[in-house]
Amino acid sequence: MRISAKADYAVRAMAELARAPGRPQKADDIAGRQDIPIRFLFTILSDLRQAGLIHSVRGPVGGYLLTPEPADLTLADVLRAVDGPLASVRDLRLTGLEYAGAAAALPDVWRAVRTSLRQVLEETTLADLAAGDLPPLVRERARTYEDDVRTYDDTARAGGDAGTPPG
């Protein structure tokens, strides 16, 4: 599973808006605080506005605001707005997906991956993120990751992330 730059930036921008609900935030300020390229941020903000998650206020004290309350917006809502479905296999629906032979059980693996993503992303709200108070499930899974993290050579894969095994 790969989280796109667009999805990462979108969640970070929304966290900034959630930290000060009701107070318009300028795109330049969000971009500066989160180190997001401003042109890319404008594209992301447009997607979020089209999805109804934010709206803009014009004028000298204008900027962007969350439309729903931060406690009513999940990270899953944000990711779907900018990247579409949380997990898909070659853009096929997982319901009814079937493979033959040795790969017959693979659709269940993909379903389990999607369910795990949904559990974390649909349980975590922007209010949780902005307050730094993550749900117990998320804290538990983050702790499991920290306990099991392995060290890999970052140069083994072009563009690989720290902690990502080669291959």
Image (cartoon, rainbow, N blue to C red):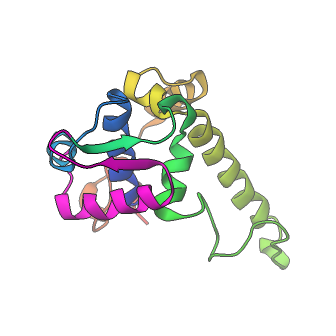
Left or right: residue 88 versus residue 9 is right
Which residue corresponds to the image point at 20% horizontal and 44% vertical from the top-left?
Answer: 26
Which residue corresponds to the image point at 39% horizontal and 23% vertical from the top-left?
Answer: 132
Residue 35 drawn above or below residue 138: below
Task: Check if residue 56 falls in the magenta segment.
Answer: yes
In this orientation, which residue lies closer to the viewer: 109 or 150? 109
Q: Position of residue 57 (x, y in %)?
A: 30, 46
In this orientation, which residue lies closer to the viewer: 7 or 116? 7
Q: Position of residue 128 (x, y in %)?
A: 47, 26
Left or right: residue 55 versus residue 128 is left
Q: Tell me where residue 154 sits by quadrant.
A: bottom left
Which residue corresponds to the image point at 25% horizontal and 63% vertical from the top-left?
Answer: 40
Q: Position of residue 134 (x, y in %)?
A: 49, 24
Q: Position of residue 65 (x, y in %)?
A: 36, 41
Q: Tell me where residue 14 sits by quadrant.
A: top left
- Assign the C terminus to one quadrant of the image: bottom left
Tell me which segment is drawn in magenta: 34-61
Say whether residue 117 is visible.
yes
Residue 134 drawn above or below residue 13: above
Which residue corresponds to the image point at 34% horizontal and 28% vertical from the top-left?
Answer: 19
In this orientation, which residue lies closer to the viewer: 116 or 46? 46
Say whether residue 5 is visible.
no
